[in-house]
Image (cartoon, helix red, strand yellow):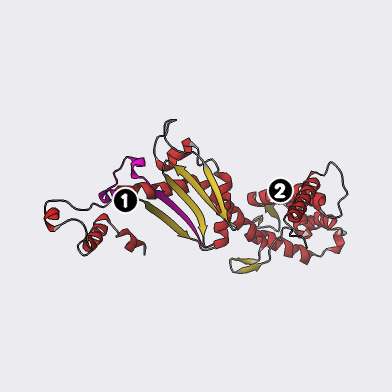
Amino acid sequence: MQSIARELSADKIEALVRKWLARLPQPFTAAERAAGYDYDISVLQAEFALTQVLDRPLMGRIFFEEAIREHLDLGRPEQVQLIFERRTTRATPSRYRTRVITEGVTPALHVDYKHSRIKQYHKESLALRTETTINDTRDFYIGKRLKNLAALCQIGFQANRRLLHVQTLSHDCLIGEDAFQQLNQPGQVAGQRVAGLRFADPRVQALLSTLVAFRLLPQGFANHDLRELLAPLLGFAPDQLTPGQMTYHLRRLRLHGLIQRIPSSHRYQVTTIGWRVALFCTRVYNRVLRPGLSQIAPGAPPGDARLLQKCYTQLEVAMDDWIANAALAS
C-alpha cells in the first residue's frame, strides 16, 4: 500500500484531471483551447500523513500521553522553526500555540504554523498517526500549481519526521513499562520458567529491601545470609524459613537479573540493575504509595496536614454540587 501511495505523482493527477476535462462541458471553445486558454490545476489543501501501526496498542496510548505531557511547548516559535525548518520572527503571521483536543477519551495534539498545521493522535487505538496539513503553499514560498506537489511532499513528510524526532525522549516511558512488566509478570529465561516479582507483594518488597543492604557486601551473600535478613522483615524467626524457600527466592532474583552467582561459589552479588530496581521500588512503595494512600483511605483521620485527603474531599464536593446543579442526582 505504501508503494502504491508513493506512485501518486503530479503527472498522474494531471492525466486524470485532463481526462475528465476533455469529457465534461466547459466554457472554453475548441478554438480558445487551441489558442492556449484552459484550466490550470492548483493545490488548495495537501495532507501528508504517517501512520505507524503498533504491535501493542496499549503501549501506543502510553507513549502518546507521555508525548503530550512532555511537549506542550511545541507551539513556541523556537520549536516550530525546528519542525517546519523555517525561520520565524515577530512579523511571521502565525498563532504560536499547542492545542490538546480531546474527543471522548482520545486526545489529539495540534501545532500551528501560519496557515498550516501538524496533527497527531492515536488512531482507532491501533496506530500513531502524524499528519501535516498545508492550506497555503505560500507559507513555504512555493507556488500553488500542481507541479509543486513533489516539493510539498518533501516539506510535509519531513515535518512529520521532525516532530517524531523531537518526541524521541518520550520512548523512555515504553522502556519503563517493559521493565516493570518483565519484573512483575512470570516468564521464561533461557528455557526456565520464572515467577514474577509482584511489586505489591510484601515478600517481594522484603526481598528488594535485602538487596539494598547486600549491595554493600564486597564478598556477596549466601543462602543463610538472605534468611537471616529476610525473616525479620516478614515477621518470622530465621529458623522458620527453610533453605528450600531461600533457594526459590534466590532463583527468582537471579533469573530476573537482579543478582548473579559468584563463579565457583554458592554466594551471590547484587547486579547494578538489581540495586537500582530494589532502591527505586522500595523507596516508591515506602515513601510515596503507602503515605499517599494513608491520606486518601476512607478510614484516614482528618487533619490539615493531610493535603491529599483535603484535595479529594474538595473534588468530591465539587462533583456533587455539579451533579446537583445539573439535576442529575437520583
Percent of width and height locating residue 166: 48, 44
Amino acid type for the residue under numbered disc 2: Leu
| Viewer can see residue 214 | no
At a point 77% along the width and 65% down the height, the residue shown is 245
Q: Which residue does the numbered mark 2 point to in the structure image?
A: 279
Cα distance in 3D space between marks 2 and 1: 58 Å
First along the sequence among labels 2 and 1: 1
* Circle 2 Cα neighbour tier, 10 Å, few/some/many (<14 / 14–19 / ≥20): some
Residue bounds of the magenta highlight:
126-148
Percent of width and height locating residue 124: 52, 63
Instruction: Count the marks.
Output: 2
Amino acid type for the residue under numbered disc 1: Val
Q: Nearer the viewer, residue 218 or 124?
A: 124
| Viewer can see residue 156 | yes
Q: Secondary structure at mark 1?
A: loop
Residue lying farthest to the top in this orientation: 90
Membership of 295 in magenta stretch: no
Q: Secondary structure at mark 2?
A: helix
Is residue 327 found left or right of 188 in the rendered image?
Answer: right
Image quarter of residue 180: bottom right
Task: Point out which mark residue 43 bears.
Answer: 1
